[in-house]
Image (spheres, grey):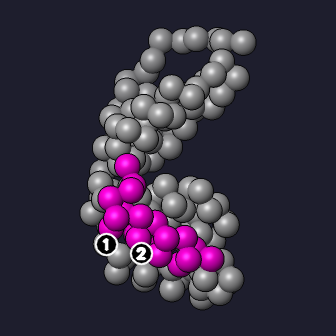
Amino acid sequence: MSDALPLSDRYRQGMATRRAVLGDNHVDRAQSATTDFDRPFQELITEAAWGHVWSRSAWTKRERSIVTIALLAALGQDEEVAMHIRATANTGATREDICEALLHVAIYAGVPAANHAIKIAKRVFCEMDAGKAA
């Protein structure tokens, strides 16, 4: 199933950015769980999302983190919301930043989406405070 191509510079930049944002432990777990089936997807998101978008210099990682959490909350992507809230330890986005982003979600995407994301954020912050988040 593999159409293996040499890894691009954009992929290598993406992997460096992905590791900087999500942390080595998270990326190593994702890499070790990769199979031939999802390898093309993993390469796509590393190159496109992390190499092309997250690596751009117009916004800081903090700003991208805030926007990403708001978008994921609005879309109801619970696991991704939790993952990106954990990543704030690496991006510099504060709890106040996340609170403000979720207030925007409430107005522009709906109270139920924001309410659910706030519950997720509170749980993740408790885990982080207890030292359980990697």
Asked if residue 130 is among those painted magenta in the image, a careful observer would answer yes
Where are the magenta residues, as a range?
116-134
Q: How many discs appear?
A: 2
Residue shown at 65% from the left, 87% from the top = 111
Q: CA distance from mark 2 to mark 1?
A: 6 Å
- According to the picture, the residue beneath numbered tag 1 turns out to be 94
Q: Amino acid at mark 2?
A: Ile
- According to the picture, the residue beneath numbered tag 2 turns out to be 98
Vertical position of residue 134 compared to residue 59: above or below: above
Dot 2: element? helix
**In the shown orientation, is residue 52 left or right of residue 1?**
left
Judging depth in this view, the residue of 31 and 53 nearest the camera is 31
Residue shown at 49% from the left, 28% from the top = 31
Residue 14 in view in this figure = no
Judging depth in this view, the residue of 83 and 18 nearest the camera is 83
Q: Residues at badges 2 and 1 in contact (C-beta under 8 Å)?
A: yes
